[in-house]
Image: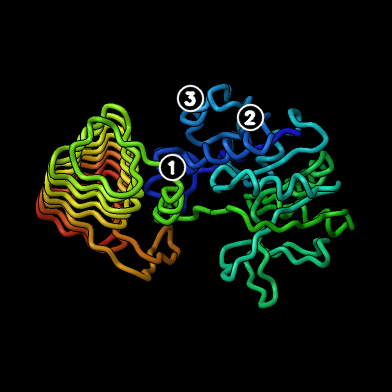
Amino acid sequence: MKAVILAAGEGTRCRPLTFTRSKVMLPIANKPMIEYVVRALHESGNSDIVMVVGFEKERIMNYFGNGGDFGVHIEYVEQKQQLGTAHSINQVKNVVGDEFLVLNGDNLVSAETITDITEKHAGGISILTAARADTTGYALVNETDGRVEEIVEGLRLSDVHSVNTGIYVLNSDIFGAISDTLYCDDRGEFGITDSIQRMIDRNYAVHAYGTDHTWVDVMQSWDLLNVNARILEDTTGSVQETVGGTIKGEVAVGSGSIVREGSYIAGPAVIGRDCEIGPNVVIAQSTSIGDNVTIEPFTYIKNSVIFDNVYIGSHSTIKNSVIGENNVIESHFVTESGKDLLIELNGALYHADEIGAVLGDGNTIGSNVSTAAGVLIGTECKIKTGAVIRKQIPNRALVV
């Protein structure tokens, strides 16, 4: 059966990083998160893939091409308006067979996760669930002996801890239910769970199967930190001849990168291609450095994700932070880090276990700038020397 990857959405809850890229292209251990889905499909024996693309689709299509470099075959279908998962799945109506697998491009899964549903599926519609103590923000699947009775969105039920992973085996019958959803629902976004619930209400056979294998959802931009650390734990280090500093633990260093004398790198960590690190730089555990990154002397970075083409000046301290592409950061930049924070995004409050700062793409930051814990800085901002950032900064702002 074909595998459909939903990759059209903007990922507004991951702003400012998703102003300039689709959420599925956010890097984890220097690979787009959707690549982990593609590789898991290949390993599970599902190599015929349809990607539903939309926002910033060119990045995705240019990266994967026809899928040959990844051992799979990929075709693309465009969702021109992001109107929810039901509308997205409806776009593949003419390119899938009677049964097809559906996954989200912004969830990390393993091959075993996928086989937990494909090998158990026995007709009708199948939903993969995962047990979560905290079900906030997830759809709950209420089932009895594997038969789904109800999918509950936006509520917390004290006796239900099975959450919907967004991984399904569907069949062509779903398109009738999607049509009903699109024509009868006026909310503007159309969820596939609404369509499935319509089928349940008509006594259609919908079954739930649980998984204990990898399923990680990136909901906000700072979730990249925990997911990045988790992936790096499985990274096998390979140190190149250009390394001149001290390496401890598993550290992967890309070709053309130079780690100068006196620098110290503690794995797990990864450094991309054509980087220049140090001298006397410390890169601590759970840090990913992208391609073409320069880190000047006496800088300390820990548990952070640095995207491609970033310059970080000397004597900087960056902890628990995400730095987008093409940022130029002068010396003595400091990100304060805090725990158990509430961060406002798009008018709503979201919890962060621990976070420093999140910077969008293309910012220019002067020397001696510091950020309070939980600050989000937009794209293409200019922040002058000596500024102390204590609140969110919108795109293209000038801070003096």
Residue 92, given in percent of the width and then of the height, sits at 71, 33
Left of 137 or right of it: where is 391?
left
Label 2, on which residue? 77
Q: Residues within 10 Å of mark 1 (few under 14, many from 20)?
A: many
Q: Does the image show residue 245?
A: yes
Q: Is residue 336 left or right of residue 226?
A: left
Q: Amino acid at mark 3?
A: Asn
Q: Nearer the viewer, residue 46 or 167?
A: 46
Q: Which residue is mark 1?
A: 26
Q: Secondary structure at mark 1?
A: loop
Q: Secondary structure at mark 3?
A: helix
Say which residue appears at 83% left-offset and 53% top-offset.
Answer: 199
In depth, the one of 14 and 49 nearer the eye is: 49
Callout 2 touching callout 1 (CB < 8 Å): no
Residue that mark 3 sits on: 62
**Quadrant of res 105:** top right
Amino acid tagged 2:
Val
Q: Quadrant of residue 144?
A: bottom right
Residue 400 appears in view? no
Residue appearing at x 48%, y 43% in the figure:
23
